[in-house]
């Protein structure tokens, strides 16, 4: 199967969309398929390292990519330079034609993905759209309004796809409630070999919590929609050290809002897995997660989880078994959940073991095979329509 993955983000970006697109490409290659990725070009500094060789069509070799990557021109998002927005380019349509795509995979379509959808429609190529970003929630966070307009855009983009894949039951319900047709569930995998409890590093723990404090960790973007400031109450608990992993425009403000917290910046790969396993509790605060991959990585690392009872975490965290779900946007509830776990080491151990057991079967290979099944169903449905 020849697949063009059109994604709004791809490594070296560090976020859920980029990670899922990478894992999808890897799995397709592993199963003998032929993917090509189309993504916004990284910053000029990173682009310099990608310009060695490659044909003039725009395909660029990437040491970390499992398949060819076509970079289209991009600009940094104003106020959030870590996010790159694709500019109009002929490379997208040219790639669909050159690759003779059987299926176009649209990862979190918003700007580049919308153009990918239009190009697929012109060429008569089936399109599978993967819903990954709560645009309506972002509209509320960044603009204080615009939720209805965001849903109109989501409905327009995903309504044109042969199939939309939602990462969680909450996301699926939202899409169906707002009139998006042809929606099915497709969750995310987790690397249980990389993220595991035995990566716990006592030397790192002594560095982060020299007085033996209980370590409560957050991993993710530092941006307004993540509401990391809700950890302020946990920072005030005696014997608790909050550790924040990630970067983004909110970091300066969070360093003021979270007194005593340790900020480690961006971590990736095995280094990130070591940090995860060295926490005692994982706390996620953002209420707009369509899935929440870091919760799965925390569970794979054997950690009890505190998360809002909203969005993706509702599918991932079994309240009272693998962690504690709390009301969204409630600083006191986050603090009280952390306090309860800090006071009971046996409960932490039980939650952590149950979380690890729950995710052990959720490998990227397993969910990748589900995705290939969705592709096959879409292609079969197209053939049926043509035959009729």
Image (tube, rainbow, N blue to C red):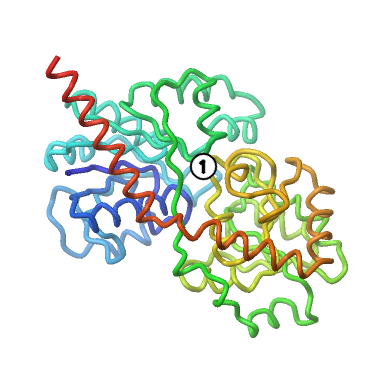
The vertical placement of 350 against 151, above or below, is: below
**Left or right of 313, for residue 171:** left
Report the label total: 1
Q: Residue at 11%, 41% (x, y): give it.
A: 98
Left/right placement of residue 43 relative to residue 323 reads left
Residue located beneath label 1 in the image: 78
Specify the quadrant of the image occupied by residue 370.
top left
Q: Could you say which is closer to the camera, residue 17 or residue 79?
A: 17
Q: Nearer the viewer, residue 82 or 307?
A: 307
Residue 264: percent from left, percent from top: 62, 69
Residue under the image location 59 percent in, 68 percent down: 276
Horizontal relation, residue 21 to residue 126: left or right: right
The residue lying at 26 percent from left, 30 percent from top is: 378
Residue 14, horizontal then vertical, whole percent: 46, 56
Where residue 262 appears, x then y in whole percent? 70, 69
Residue 228 in picture, x, y percent from top left: 69, 51
Q: Residue at x 75, y 45 (%)?
A: 326
């Amino acid at each position: 199967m020849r697949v063009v993955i059109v994604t709004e983000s791809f490594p070296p970006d560090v976020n859920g969309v980029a990670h899922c697109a990478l894992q999808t490409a890897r799995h397709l290659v592993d199963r003998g398929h032929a993917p090509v990725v189309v993504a916004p070009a990284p910053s000029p500094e990173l682009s310099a390292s990608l310009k060695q060789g490659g044909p003039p069509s725009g395909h660029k070799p990437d040491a970390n990519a499992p398949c060819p990557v076509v970079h289209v021109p991009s600009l940094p998002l104003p106020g959030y330079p870590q996010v790159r927005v694709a500019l109009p380019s002929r490379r997208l349509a040219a790639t669909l034609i050159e690759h003779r795509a059987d299926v176009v995979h649209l990862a979190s379509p918003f700007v580049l993905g919308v153009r990918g959808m239009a190009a697929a429609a012109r060429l008569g190529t089936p399109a599978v759209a993967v819903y990954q970003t709560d645009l309506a929630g972002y509209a509320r966070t960044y603009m204080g309004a615009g939720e209805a307009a965001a849903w109109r855009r989501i409905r327009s983009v995903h309504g044109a796809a042969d199939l939309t894949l939602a990462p969680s039951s909450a996301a699926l319900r939202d899409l169906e409630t707002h009139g998006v047709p042809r929606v099915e569930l497709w969750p995310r995998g987790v690397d249980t070999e990389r993220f595991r409890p035995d990566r716990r590093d006592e030397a790192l723990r002594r560095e982060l919590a020299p007085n033996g404090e209980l370590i409560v960790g957050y991993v993710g973007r530092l941006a307004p929609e993540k509401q990391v400031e809700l950890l302020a109450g946990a920072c005030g608990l005696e014997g608790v050290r909050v550790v924040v992993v990630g970067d983004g425009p909110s970091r300066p403000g969070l360093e003021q809002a979270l007194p005593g917290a340790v900020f480690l910046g961006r971590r990736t790969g095995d280094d990130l897995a070591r940090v995860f396993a060295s926490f005692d509790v994982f706390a996620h605060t953002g209420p707009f997660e369509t899935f929440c991959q870091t919760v799965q990585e925390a569970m794979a690392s054997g950690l009890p989880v505190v998360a809002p009872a909203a969005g993706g975490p509702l599918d991932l965290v079994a309240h009272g078994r693998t962690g504690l779900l709390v009301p969204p946007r409630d600083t006191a509830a986050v603090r009280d959940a952390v306090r309860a776990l800090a006071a009971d080491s046996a409960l932490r151990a039980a939650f952590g073991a149950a979380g690890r057991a729950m995710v052990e079967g959720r490998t990227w290979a397993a969910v990748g095979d589900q995705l290939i099944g969705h592709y096959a169903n879409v292609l079969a449905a197209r053939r049926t329509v043509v035959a009729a």
